Image (cartoon, rainbow, N blue to C red):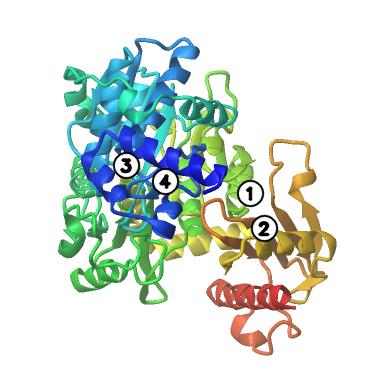
Amino acid sequence: MDLSERVEDEWVAAWIAADPDPATRAELSALDGPDLAERFAAPLRFGTAGLRGPVRAGPNGMNVAVVTRATAGLAAWLIEHGHRGGSVVVGRDARHGSEQFAAAAAQVLAAAGFRVVVVPAPGPTPLVAFACRDLDAVAGVQITASHNPPGDNGYKVYLAGGAQIVPPADGEIEELIAASPHAVDVPRRDVVHDPRADEIVGRYLDRISTRFPMVADASLRIALTPMHGVGGALAVDALARAGFTDVHVVDEQFDPDPDFPTVAFPNPEEAGASDLLLACAEKVEADIAIALDPDADRCAVGTRVDGTWRMLTGDETGALLGSFILSDAAAGPDDSPPVVASTLVSSSLLEKIARRVGARHVTTLTGFKWLVRAGEPLRYAYEEAIGHCVDPDAVRDKDGISAAVAVAVLADRCRRDDVGVADLLVSLYETHGVHVTRQHSVRVDDTTVIAALMDRLRTSPPSTLAGIAVTAEDYARRDDGLRTDAIALSGVAGDGMSVRVMARPSGTEPKLKYYIEMTTPPGFVVSATQSPAQTTYGADTRALVHLLDDMTLRVAAELAEYGRT
């Protein structure tokens, strides 16, 4: 046995001995060879999203030992930054291990001298973000893996004000985690119940009611699914307070279930995930369909489009909610224009909507950690991945519950005006031009393939996409707040039709993502060179949407071919 093998064996033995959970100690002790080595190959990294990984023993899994040391590092960081003795909110979803992990985090924080406010039951992630602001807490911890597969769990951190962490805080906390004692040596203490915990849900619902008051004589019929997550009961309550009581839930998906038995992947964006919801909407003749992801921080919307139920994209919902919120958004105290924000991979439609009404639009890097820091007075922010922040003064993160209420209020107005939600989207296209977006991903086993593709896009990008000449911009060379590992391909045809593609590596999966957008200017008329069915399309906005949708498919196919050659 060489020195490196002895060191590794000593590390494994020390980790097992220091694991405070007998179940995971036994799990590791039963492993050997490659299976044991794999558990120690690459410890979970703490980043701006906290931790996320499979629930299992060892340093690269979510378990009590990892959560204990992560919380010790967070506590040390808070103390270093002058927050000793402050309040910290701890919440959890209903995933495997969440109760145990939340208890460990709360006990470590209590032993470190913090006043710990434990959300009393499994609840949505936005509850913790709200409570951080509402209670003036110095931090919040939510145990959740959002819409990851059932075998995963995670550890999400909010700092003062209820916003997610940004660099350099993530790196500083990670260093302190690495310097933390063995998990068994980290002090833990039982948490004294804080009566403020009993008020969190009520105060959160009261805030939503303040932001979206009761709608008199509402007759909107809603189909709803929380997708086996923790948002169902709270969403029904919030909707009822706003006047929406005709809510039909997907029974098979309403109660929390960490195994997510009716879906292959518990993400409303995934193909097939919302099939039961749309079937329910069709059956009960609903006016709108709403899907929450399992921790209820995301909200997807389904509606009839050309007579058929389908889920809207995050960009489509973002345009609808952005226009709705800006219709009565207040200026700042110094009469500064209201601010709305979206990310560099989202549609450009919100920017045009904002410009028309005199609001300020800000483009940020991906993630709500950046969106909620876009500027003041922030009134709305969204990302294409069905995340919506409709009440930034209360929740500085995406919030599926309050977004669901906002969607209901919007749909109720449409119903009273005898127009469909899809009709409202068409009217936005007629005012600002048609905007159609699509994602295309290249999944790989070897991540060096992604680096090679990005290098090729930088050195020899495609010259045309969908017949439109394009130029490339390397966002890694920018010197502003949008500097990131991404490449934009964009161009405008002579008739005003445009294409834009943002290419970037996924931050969580081994794949390269292409975010495609095709747009036309207002009043665009399809030429014979673009479609032989000129009289079919013409100025028909709905038909133009279908044409652009086909063109995004063409762009995706061209990008796939580019990656193969």
Q: Callout 4: helix, strand or loop?
A: strand
- In primary-sequence order, the first of circles 3 and 1 is 3
Residue at the disc numbered 3: 63
Disc assigned to residue 502 = 2
Pointer 2 with pointer 4, Cβ within 8 A: no
Task: Depth check: give the residue in front, 91 or 526.
Answer: 91
Q: Callout 2: helix, strand or loop?
A: strand
Across and down, in percent, residue 182 comes to 38, 28
541 with respect to 69 (left or right): right
Q: Amino acid at mark 2?
A: Met
Disc assigned to residue 344 = 1
Closest to the camera, between mark 4 and mark 1, is 4
Label 3, label 4: how far apart the Cα atoms are: 11 Å
Disc assigned to residue 52 = 4
Across and down, in percent, residue 477 comes to 80, 44
Label 4, label 1: how far apart the Cα atoms are: 24 Å
Pointer 1 with pointer 2, Cβ within 8 A: yes
